[in-house]
Amino acid sequence: MLQIRDLIWGLLFIGCAAAIQVEITPRQGEISVGESKFFLCEVVGDAKDIDWYDPSGEKILPNRPDIFVNRGDETMSTLTIYHANVDSAGIYKCVAKNGDKEAQATVQVKIFQKITFASAPSPQEFNEGDDADIVCNVVSSPPPTIIWKHKGSKIQVDKDVRYKIMDNGHLQIRGIKKIDEGMYNCEARVMARGEIDFKMIKVVVNVLPTIRARLSEVNATADIGRSALLACDADGFPEPTVTWAHNNIVLETGDKYSLNEDGSELVIKDVKKVDEGDYTCIAKNKAGEKAEEVSLNVFVQPKITYLNNQTASEFDEQVTLTCEALGDPTPTISWSFENRVFTEGEQSLDRNIVVRSHARVSSLTLKNVVFTYAGYYLCIASNSIGQDSQHMYLEVRYAPKIQGQVTVYTWEGNAANISCEVEAHPGASVVWFRDGLQLPSANTTNMKIYNTQTVSYLEIKPESQNDFGSYNCTATNVMGTDSKEFLLIQAEVPSSPDIQQVEPFSSTAVVAFEEPDSMGGVPILKYKVEWRLPGQDWTGSEHNANDEMTTITIVGLKPETTYEVKMSAINGKGEGESSPARTFKTEPVLSAEIPTTIAATTMAIKGEPSAPVLEVKVQDRGNTLKVNWIKQDDGGSPIKHYLVRYKAKHVSDWKPEIRLPHNSEYVTLNGLDWNTEYEVYVVAENQQGKSEPAVISFRTATDPTTIPDAMDGGSGLGTGAIVGILIVVFFLLLVGVDVTCYFLNKCGLLMCIAVNFCGKAGPGAKNKDIEEGKAAFTKDESKEPIVEVRTEEEHTPNQGGGGPTEPNETTPLTEPDGKTVKDDNTKGQTEVKNTTDEVKTVPNEAPQTNGNESKA
């Protein structure tokens, strides 16, 4: 059996060897474009040749670059397709041959395109308002389905008409806005393979710049070294760049211009008139550009460009002064001369001064020229920006004109100057004459001549009456000659002053007078006043004269005395006649005047008031004092004010001076130190000066121990009221303490009154223990009552009166002999009373001591 079986198997093996079988692994293939893949062809049986054929039926040769065939051994061959493309698809065949025997197998190769984003750039930029086409080109086989997402959500084109998915898969957004900016998801799907891929695309929306000038017009002033600032603010996305242009020329930072970091501010340095005009601010970014105009107005301060000095002669028909000025706005031009201002038109009633202006030129015409026209003229050019002014000089040539005082007074032996004041242009030469002879002559040794630029002085010291008379001054220049006669006159003494009124006081008198009718030709130097008692010698004093002197004060007079007074005037020539004597009587001394010794001291001061008399009055508060004074002699002139100074004697510094009106009669000094000695000075002052100080000293009170007043003004309570209040408070406090003692301890004044006058023991006395100082007897461990014994002296007033005590709930009943009547209902309480002793029981439950002990 075994041999038959082996035989069968051998026959089967031989049969199989005779046949060839071919198998390709894998049996089918899908290759993505660009990928590589190989296929294995296995042969069962002897095969001499194993060949591969492409889809076109051509045998694949070994040297093809895209498809490679490799026979590994006699039973296997490999077909490798490198970087497959669409043309690589088809049916490939593997053929095995051995003689006339042949076997083959085929494999279907499919080439597909994976999802590939051929063009999906990121970011993609668009201008706001444009129809944006977001590019997303996807390649695959079969063609993919495109889905767009934004902010995590699928874009629903049927809900927003602005969105549209194009046939090529692009996303279109109509009128794209800044809010549409962001990340977009382009998702591609191939349903047949379940393949999916996406690409994130950033969409940027650029915004066209907006621009706004901070000031559409800027004003600047030229030629003063200042700068002008032009500024504009731009916005947009991306951030725009800002540039400036003027006259189509882009401006850059340099000597003339300066730009800040972002270009929004343009500074024009050292502004000139030529810088005026329009400047363009340009903002530019990817979305485009915008421009805004800024106007620079350059104003120019006035500047006088032409003004020359002029020369004319007196009596010329006219002379014209011209002034020219530049400026923007066009300046107005005016003239001034010696504080007089000339504007457009005729400037005088005689029409001799006329101003005419045209554009930037003004002319001042002076007709019928006179010498007073000479001098400096001021040309003023002004506009809203500022002004400029310059002087010019008008020179007027004229013949000499002599001025000066014609008459001069002096006396023999006193030198005098005759002044010949000459006005002339050009300068004149001056010559003095007398009686036709030029001075000084050989015979005149008492005369001298002094010359200045405008004045010639003839000094004469008269020696006799012949030196008085007429003197001639003659001045000559190229324009002409002028002469003038001067008179030297003998001076006289003045006439007498006129006494108008005498106002007497107790020790002084004020003499009011008028100056003499005749000064004698020369000024009055002094006034002399003389007074006397009738029939006695005259006493006098001299006073320097001044223009305002109308009164003189006589001092050192006696009260209630009749005097005579007269006056005379004194000039350089001498003293004139005295006025008629005038009688007056001094006033009596006031009762409050200071002592004679002090008055005599103060009288020595001419015209000054006397010191006031002082009196000190202490106020309610000891550190406040009132200083009164009584007015004394005012020295013939009203008191202007009083000056008060004070200080503590132990210090050197005075308190600040107090100035009080003339009608004041006292001063109050507050806040002084306690128990301190002070000194006070009071001075009266009039027009003539100050009086001697009136001095007074005082000491303040000691520091009080009572409560000070509530208010410094004295409106608080007085000391008596405060003491009364304290007594009342103390009394109420005592009453409160006494009432408390009465109710708590059964003692005090109230208790005494209750016991002695009312016969009552006070509230709660029944239940109190025996008071200290009383005798108490108790029995040991018994129910017997405690007995209180009182002496006769301790009895209430009712006992002393012989009458029985009014019974109450604690008073026991007694018989006439003094024995106690017991009551079964008294519950062990008993009170024994007789004429000498009082026995009182209290409940035996009270604390007890030894029954034999007692308290005294």
Image (spheres, grey):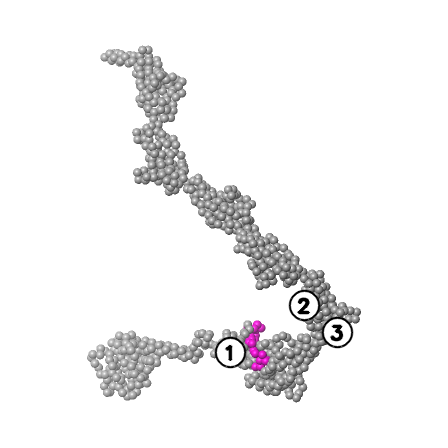
Circle nearer the N terminus (3, 1): 3
Q: Is residue 145 visible?
A: yes
Outermost residue on the left side: it is: 824
Question: What percent of the width, then of the height, locates residue 692?
Answer: 59, 78
Q: Quadrant of residue 358?
A: bottom right
Locate the N terminus by quadrant.
top left
Task: Check the image and report above or below for 13 versus 661.
Answer: above
Tell me the amino acid under the disc marked 2. Answer: Gln
Mark 2, residue position:
403
Calculate the distance from the C-alpha at mark 3 to the C-alpha at mark 2. 22 Å
Locate the C terminus by quadrant.
bottom left
Mark 3, residue position:
467
Question: What percent of the width, then of the height, locates residue 751?
Answer: 32, 80
Task: Check the image and report above or below for 273 versus 131.
Answer: below
- The numbered dot on residue 626 is 1
- The numbered dot on residue 705 is none
Calculate the distance from the C-alpha at mark 2 to the C-alpha at mark 1. 68 Å
Which one is closest to the eye, mark 2 or mark 1? 2
